[in-house]
């Protein structure tokens, strides 16, 4: 009887003993171990009318991450990215995150907020408080580039914007940070300065991309050339002023313009300094083909035209400064400028059009003569349908400095300065 009792005791007691031992050992293991840190770099970014993407930095030693939406549990994941789906359009959502470890969890992070896109209209696809963006160009919807100050270049890969050039603002750590998203090891352009800016970008294809700005190497202004493999080099050394804009009709016909009337032309083999028709700052260049190139300098109302051989001055008939030109052919051109100025050239003369706005218009781009956008100060976006210019809601009252598109379904606007929650940001809008 006694043996039976002892046998039964061990049968029931042994598992209990093992459980107690397990917890005791676990307790000893975790006794002096701190809880995980709250994940850093936690951001929320709308990517469509019903999706918001969450990103955060890795916390060493944790097993997973718990995400809450609106104070309620949403998901537990092991990756450093999570896309919340099936959301309502044009709706604001708040998120928190915590790291889960074997010995306990971190505290919840502060809330981050994102607003899903509206089904139609303009919406923000990228914003940063780190750099002022200045120009945009791309080859297709999976390869779009934007440049700005701090020698910054970002690439859109079809899903996210990622920095591929950092001119030295974070050179010591080889890290770049946007909206608390940390990107590691972007391309560092040696010897550029944090206060250098990249003001213009253009390429003839993915393997031939050119960037201009106040880019200094050994205190001399340059152009940066980048190919598809990330190989970069300084070209056109020895300039005595910065370059502000660049455009080409193809790989063998590229113009770069800048301060003190600088004009350089690339013929496919060499960059040659052209005789300039002005000694003023030239801040815009654009063309239709090899024999139809236009530049705008700092003199109100003035445009210069290049016919393939010589530059000639064009009298537009306005006393306002002009900032941009676009058109489909040389007898159907549009120019925009100060105080809501829009001019149209029909091949014989320039005539003013009613823009409906008084704000400065900084940029113009179109898909065809019946589908044109102009953007400017005070968040102004206006659209031309072939007959009239009408205002569109940009969602901001900030300074819009550039409009560019791949086609009529993919049009992008750079908001050089917008104010969000009392703080200045630079953003990219998409329609």
Image (cartoon, helix red, strand yellow):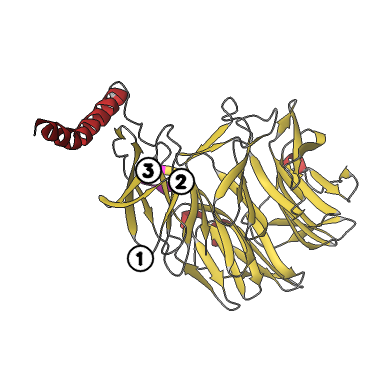
Give the x, y percent position of residue 139: 69, 58
Q: At numbered mark 2, what does the secondary structure look like: helix, strand or loop?
A: loop
The residue pinned by badge 1 equals 88
Q: Earlier in the sequence, mark 3 or mark 1?
A: 3
Assign the N terminus to one quadrant of the image.
top left
Q: Residues within 10 Å of mark 1 (few under 14, many from 20)?
A: some
Q: At numbered mark 1, what does the secondary structure look like: helix, strand or loop?
A: loop
The residue pinned by badge 2 equals 79
Q: Is residue 40 left or right of residue 413?
A: left
Give the x, y percent position of residue 2: 9, 31
Q: Which residues are magenta?
A: 418-423
Give the x, y percent position of residue 379: 47, 57
Using the rendered image of the protein, determine whether residue 195 is visible from the camera's viewpoint: yes
Q: Residues within 10 Å of mark 3 (few under 14, many from 20)?
A: many
Nearest to the observer: residue 352 or residue 180:
180
Q: Is residue 323 left or right of residue 271?
A: left
Q: Residue most toward the top?
A: 32
Give the x, y percent position of residue 18: 25, 32
């Amino acid at each position: 009887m006694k043996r039976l009792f002892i046998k039964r005791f061990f049968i029931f007691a042994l598992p209990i003993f093992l459980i107690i031992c397990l917890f005791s050992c676990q307790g000893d293991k975790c006794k002096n171990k701190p809880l995980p840190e709250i994940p850093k770099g936690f951001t929320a970014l709308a990517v469509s009318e019903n999706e918001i993407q969450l990103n955060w930095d890795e916390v060493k030693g944790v097993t997973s991450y718990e995400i809450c939406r609106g104070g309620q549990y949403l998901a537990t994941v092991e990756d450093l990215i999570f896309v919340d789906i099936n959301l309502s359009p044009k709706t604001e959502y708040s998120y928190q995150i915590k790291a889960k470890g074997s010995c306990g969890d971190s505290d919840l992070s502060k809330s981050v907020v994102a607003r899903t896109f509206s089904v139609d209209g303009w919406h923000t696809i990228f914003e940063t408080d780190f750099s002022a963006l200045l120009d945009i160009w791309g080859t297709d919807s999976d390869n779009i580039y934007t440049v700005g100050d701090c020698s910054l270049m970002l690439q859109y890969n079809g899903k996210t914007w990622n920095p591929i050039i950092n001119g030295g603002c974070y050179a010591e750590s080889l890290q770049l940070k946007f909206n608390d998203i940390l990107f590691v090891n972007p391309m560092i352009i040696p010897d550029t300065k944090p206060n250098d800016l990249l003001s213009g970008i253009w390429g003839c294809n993915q393997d031939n991309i050119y960037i201009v700005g106040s880019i200094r190497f050994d205190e001399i202004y340059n152009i940066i050339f980048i190919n598809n493999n990330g190989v970069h080099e300084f070209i056109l050394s020895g300039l005595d002023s910065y370059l502000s804009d660049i455009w080409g009709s193809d790989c063998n016909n590229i113009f770069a313009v800048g301060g003190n009337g600088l004009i350089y032309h690339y013929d496919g083999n060499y960059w040659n300094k052209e005789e300039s028709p002005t000694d003023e700052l030239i801040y815009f260049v654009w063309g239709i083909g090899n024999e139809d190139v236009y530049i705008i300098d700092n003199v109100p109302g003035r445009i210069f035209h290049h016919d393939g051989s010589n530059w000639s001055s064009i009298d537009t008939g306005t006393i306002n400064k002009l900032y941009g030109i676009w058109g489909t052919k040389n007898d159907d051109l549009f120019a925009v400028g100060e105080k809501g100025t829009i001019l149209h050239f029909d091949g014989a003369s320039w005539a003013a059009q009613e823009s409906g706005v008084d704000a400065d218009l900084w940029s113009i781009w179109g898909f065809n003569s019946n589908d044109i956008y102009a953007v400017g100060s005070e968040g102004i976006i206006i659209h031309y349908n072939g007959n009239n210019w009408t205002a569109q809601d940009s969602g901001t009252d900030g300074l819009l400095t550039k409009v560019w598109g791949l086609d009529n379904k993919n049009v992008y606007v750079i908001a050089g300065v917008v104010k969000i929650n009392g703080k200045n940001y630079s953003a990219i809008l998409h329609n």
